[in-house]
Image (cartoon, rainbow, N blue to C red):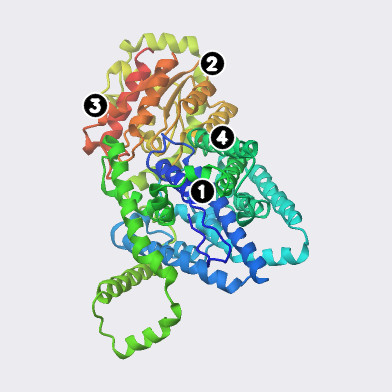
Amino acid sequence: MQQSGSKRLAHSRYISGFDGIRTIAVIGVIVYHLLPYSLQGGYLGVPIFFVVSGYLITDLLLQEYEQNGRIDVLNFYGRRMKRLSPALVTMVLTTAAYITLFQRSLFVNLKAIITTNLLYVYNWWEIGHGQSYFDRFNGESPFTHLWSLSIEGQFYLFWPVILILLLSLFRQRKQIFYLILGLAVLSAIWMGVLYAGVASTNRVYYGTDTRMFAILLGVALAFLWPATKLKTELPVKAKHLLDGTGIVSMVLIIWLFLTMSGQSTFTYRGGMFLFTLLSAILVATVAHPAGVMNRVLSNRLFDWVGKRSYGIYLYQFPIMIFYEAKVTNIADHPVLNALIETLLILIVSDLSYRYLERPARHYDYSQLPARFKAFIKHPALVGWQRYVVVPAALIVVVALFGAATAPSHLAANQTALQHKIQKNQKQASKSNQAALKKQREAAKQTAKQKKADAAWAKVKLNSHQKQLVKSYGLTKRQVVLAKRIPVTAVGDSVMVDVSSDLRQVMPNTYVSASVGRQIWQAPHQIQALQAQGALAQNVVVNLGTNSPMTDAQIDKVIRMIGPNRQIFWINTHVPTRNWETSVNRTIARAAKRFSNVTLVDWHSLSKNHKNWFYKDNVHPNPTGNRYLTRLVVRHLTANA
């Protein structure tokens, strides 16, 4: 994300290929956020940034120590602040001001978010308060990605002092290399130890201790592979080995970009460390002046993107989230919208680089007191000042006002949708116990129940059943059969929303649903339901609202439910997200692969009915819930 930003030393060399590495990393991150179903491992661009930062900073500090006999820590801090702080402060305050004025749904915890980001401890705050990095729908924050900048900020604060201490304690640098490498391995092991499934993802993903191995591998490489001491010429065999290693590492990195899911256990128990090790190898091959990789990754495009990679990374989330909040038909043209968002990110990043980051890096801040005194004496703004100072002051005032007035949590009854979801969740425990009891009683009377079902035409509807026929547009047969059908419903907030209607028609329904649930969390829930004996013969699934899914993920859920159960999978209506079409195709393919899976095509039925949904155009309102319930009941009773 950052370039070295250090003062040029007498014998230092600029490695242009690092801009190419930054470009690969930032492309991975941006594509992952814009089109997550096409590059499920794109989030791994961050470890690449960490390795490059660890290597460059340590290499330059070691060069300074060798040439000057000391490391000027205060000067280092000053350079880092001039490089990082102007853009970060601008992004945080501008985003906070925009939220205060135009997107109050993101208003919560604004004071804590601003404070922790400016103090570079935001990653630790996110562990306890933030959402999952992989939650792509449920109130996605424009600040989430800043966790990595906090880790780098902590590294910049402590590493120069630690380095000085290590250089004074150890005579041989290879001893420091082994120590740092050992600490990197311990950090990776610690990540695996702490990872205990879905509930621990935030802890291991955001934690400094569990992510530090990436920076430490870069640090260790700087001791082993100093940029200014590498030979410019190598024997032919050594050169071929160097180039081949670089090419293989880059191919493997791209492959892992495509395949390594952020929800996989393997990712946190060795996978991410393996990827980071490959990144360190690639950095080493690019740093070597005798190799070809530096030339491969050096061109005008990579140079342009690499120099702006910090800004691109910094501004990506606010632009994407604010854009997608205004454009409500993202799913209709996902690629086109992704291109528009990319263009906006590049434009903003370029403006930031030209008019903020680069000037701030070379600005003489010792002039500020004199300029402030001059302004006090003559406060009139002239020329460009009025077009910069006044808007900047307004942004700061609005952002600080927002921070001072923002609540620490949402009001319980902020919207009708939230009120309904919370009410349904509170009712779930009591209703589930009653449904489970009825299911167990029905299981003992299978023959009697089948006989009763066959005689549905003779059943006389009571007043409640007659009302169900009228309200949900069902037939007498459907209402009679639905009363006895045992159902387990598994899903996300859409399922929570519709659960009360499903229970109205199918009282033997056990609901396991929660806000923000994603496909990769389903196996754990299926296991829990099986352990409770709460997995009925008929399973209704509604997953796909909050994130894309792969064929492997949906197949795993289907196989866990089992071939002897009938699965009714509701596809998605989420036009505000670019993965709608991808998710629905994945569900349709699964329905063709598995004979016990029935596609419940909610998307086609609801596509042109905005009046069926709340304001978010995703969660059905009372009208939409009646239509969705009727659709589900029709499928479940079709072959009963």
Residue 621 visible in the picture: no
Which SS class for mark 3?
helix
Which of disc 4 and disc 2 is earlier in sequence?
4
221, 33: nearer the viewer: 221
Q: Nearer the viewer, residue 545 or 436?
A: 545
Left or right, residue 259 beside residue 499: right
Residue at point 50% right, 50% down?
A: 18
Residue at mark 4 to residue at mark 3: CA–CA distance: 66 Å
Q: What is the C-alpha distance between the residues marked 4 and 1?
A: 20 Å
Q: Amino acid at mark 2?
A: Lys
Q: Position of residue 324 (x, y in %)?
A: 31, 46
Q: Answer above or below: position of 32 versus 627.
A: below
Residue 487 image offset from top left, x and y in percent: 44, 24
Q: Identify the mark nearer the N-term, 4 or 1.
A: 1
Q: Nearer the viewer, mark 3 or mark 1?
A: 1
**Residue identified by numbered label 1:** 46
Question: In the image, what residue type sits under mark 1?
Answer: Val
Q: Return the residue at label 2.
A: 444
Q: Which residue is mark 4?
A: 248
Query: Is 584 located above or below residue 154 in the figure?
Result: above
Residues marked 2 and 4 touching at CB (< 8 Å) = no
Q: As displayed, is residue 214 above or below residue 330?
A: below
Q: Which residue is mark 3?
A: 470
Percent position (x, y) of residue 277? 62, 43
